[in-house]
Image: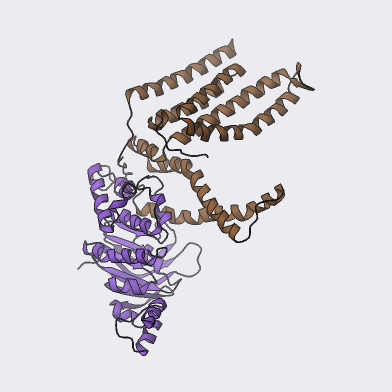
Chain colours: A purple, B brown
């Protein structure tokens, strides 16, 4: 299958930074896959999403070295804080979700249909008439993801999308990701929440100080995390817990 | 409370351009008025405009308008009344310049009328309706966003300030006491308010870009130019409202023609 996004030994330096946030990263993103990008804080996961989707350096500035080929017709990105991603121009969820396709100047019926499909996919159709500014964090983040999906992108980057959500809302959001990928959209997911992300990811990339240190099937790549190693040594049966809260829950059971 | 107040008055239902045209007419008209009586009529006109928005609008625009205008009135009376030219008239024990008082009345009246008219427009123009009207009118996204952000910045900052205030009070910030102590308490409030807003700007820019704001047209004739946004629910405009807007323009032009004619005469 031809790649939507290809990075070949790509490095990226933010404006004013003295060392690259990404170094010699090579990566291929295929359609309909959920690619989990993980690593410690400051490893460069957010930067990798911005570079892969073309927003860096186009919007954020900086220098890109190496070869990048973005065959995806349209890429979009969702951040962890949903309230910073509202347009501020819409009084209903319906209009907020329709904001993207409306910006493309598509016919009104096409815009409405794209918004309706996206709201259905994220299970927020019942919120259509609500004011986005009055939603809970979990509802709002799903609306923001729906708004990004309404653009019908070839690739969507989610940067720690459940960071501000309660466990139930986070579960609901992650549960929607395989469906999004199944529709043909590549999902690039950066998060430290491995326990939720690993089961829905088709592939995982681990970054360390801006470099890719592991890549492959999530089960294989993430089995090497400290928590997984401890759990294995303690005799936990697979799937191994990947982070401390998950290990604690398993021990409590 | 400065900002949009939901309602069903004639101003709320009017096309946003009509409401803004009324406020604009007061603004331009104010500078065509040169005598206290004329400006007094303009203030009455602005009050009438506010009354059209209903009781809630009148309350939300009249009080802040008066509070904003009051210090200016005081300053104008002190400046022009005390330092204005002869002859002087007695106001109790104080001798004030008659011409200075007239000037203060004109200037203060202008400020009051303009502030009242614009606060009324702000209170009765739903930002999303203005956005839709401008979108339907083919305005570029940057201009729409700038105007809409201006209209909504006060309520958003107020909400954010309330959150910061609660957080700082939880951490021991005391707001009471002398004016100096209150002034000092502003620091822990203002700094996170401004810095927080600035910190989120980058993410907001990225988010808007990611959602196609200011997108280019895709292919076809004229590809590469800015795409014209689709208006999803543009507010209804009517012939009567268009006539009102043109009439306001004619009135303003007539007022200026009359002003310059009387200046030459």
Q: Position of residue B8 (x, y in %)?
A: 39, 33
- Image point (41%, 62%), residue name: A80
Task: Tell which residue pokes out farthest to the top in this image.
Answer: B265
Residue found farthest to the right: B93
Snapshot quadrant of residue A223: bottom left
- Determine whether, in the image, residue A214 is placed left or right of residue A71: right
Viewer-closest of B104 and A91: A91
Q: Residue at x 34, y 55 (%)?
A: A143
One can see residue B119 in this view: yes
In the rendered structure, the answer to whether residue B15 lies left or right of residue B194 reads left
Q: On screen, B63 above or below A66?
A: above
Quarter residue A136 falls in: bottom left
Mark count = 0
In the displayed structure, does residue B178 sit left or right of residue B26?
Answer: right
Q: Residue furthest left?
A: A1
Q: Nearer the viewer, residue B135 or B180?
A: B180
Q: Residue furthest front?
A: A253
Picture quadrant of residue A6: bottom left
Does residue A107 show up?
A: no
Residue B44 drawn at (x, y percent): 54, 22
Looking at the picture, does residue B169 appear above or below residue A93? below
Which residue sits at x=26%, y=61%? Answer: A71
A136 or A220, which lies in front? A136
Q: Which corner quadrant holds the C terminus of chain B?
A: top right
Q: Is residue A251 above or below residue A179?
A: below
Q: Is residue A34 left or right of residue B91?
A: left
Residue A215 point in image, percent of width and height: 32, 77
Reply above or below: B143 against B18.
below
On the image, the x and y values in percent for residue A35 come to 30, 69
**Residue under the image location 43 percent in, 58 percent down:** A60
């Amino acid at each position: 299958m031809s790649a939507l996004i290809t990075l070949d030994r790509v490095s990226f330096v933010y404006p004013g930074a003295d060392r690259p946030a990404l170094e010699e990263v090579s990566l291929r993103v295929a359609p309909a896959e959920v690619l989990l990008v993980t690593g410690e804080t400051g490893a460069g996961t957010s930067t990798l999403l911005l570079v892969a989707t073309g927003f860096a350096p186009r919007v954020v500035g900086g220098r890109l070295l190496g070869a990048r080929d973005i065959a995806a017709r349209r890429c979009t990105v969702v951040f962890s804080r949903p309230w910073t991603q509202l347009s501020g121009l819409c009084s209903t969820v319906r209009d907020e979700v329709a904001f993207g396709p409306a910006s493309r100047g598509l016919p009104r019926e096409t815009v409405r249909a794209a918004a309706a499909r996206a709201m259905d996919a994220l299970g927020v159709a019942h919120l259509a008439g609500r004011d986005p500014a009055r939603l809970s964090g979990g509802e709002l983040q799903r609306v923001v993801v729906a708004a990004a999906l309404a653009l019908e992108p070839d690739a969507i980057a989610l940067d720690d999308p459940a960071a501000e959500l309660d466990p139930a809302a986070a579960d609901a959001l992650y549960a929607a990701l395989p469906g999004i990928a199944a529709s043909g959209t590549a999902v690039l997911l950066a998060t430290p929440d491995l326990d939720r992300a690993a089961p829905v990811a088709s592939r995982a990339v681990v970054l360390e100080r801006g470099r890719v240190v592991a890549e492959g099937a999530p089960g294989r790549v993430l089995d090497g995390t400290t928590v997984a190693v401890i759990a294995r040594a303690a005799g936990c049966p697979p799937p191994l817990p990947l982070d401390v809260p998950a290990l604690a829950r398993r021990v409590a059971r | 409370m400065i900002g949009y107040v939901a309602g069903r008055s004639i101003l709320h239902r009017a096309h946003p351009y009509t409401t803004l045209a009324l406020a604009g007419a007061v603004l331009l008209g104010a500078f065509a008025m040169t005598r206290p009586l004329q400006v007094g009529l303009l203030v009455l006109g602005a009050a009438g405009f506010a009354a059209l928005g209903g009781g809630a609008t009148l309350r939300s625009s009249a009080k802040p308008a008066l509070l904003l205008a009051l210090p200016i009135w005081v300053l104008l009376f002190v400046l022009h009344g005390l330092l204005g030219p002869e002859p002087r008239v007695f106001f109790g024990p104080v001798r004030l310049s008659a011409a200075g008082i007239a000037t203060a009345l004109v200037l203060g009246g202008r400020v009051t009328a303009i502030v009242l008219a614009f606060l009324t427009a702000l209170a009765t123009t739903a930002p999303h309706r203005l956005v839709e009207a401008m979108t339907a009118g083919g305005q570029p996204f940057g201009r729409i966003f700038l105007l809409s952000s201006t209209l909504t910045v006060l309520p958003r900052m107020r909400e954010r300030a309330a959150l910061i205030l609660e957080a700082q009070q939880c951490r021991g910030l005391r707001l009471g006491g002398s004016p100096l102590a209150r002034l000092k308490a502003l620091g822990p409030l203002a700094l996170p308010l401004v810095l927080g807003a600035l910190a989120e700007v980058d993410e907001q820019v990225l988010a808007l870009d990611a959602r196609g704001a200011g997108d280019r047209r895709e292919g076809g004739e004229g590809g590469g130019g800015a795409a014209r946004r689709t208006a999803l629910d543009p507010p209804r405009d009517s012939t009567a409202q268009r006539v009102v807007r043109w009439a306001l323009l004619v009135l303003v032009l007539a007022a200026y023609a009359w002003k310059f004619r009387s200046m030459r005469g």
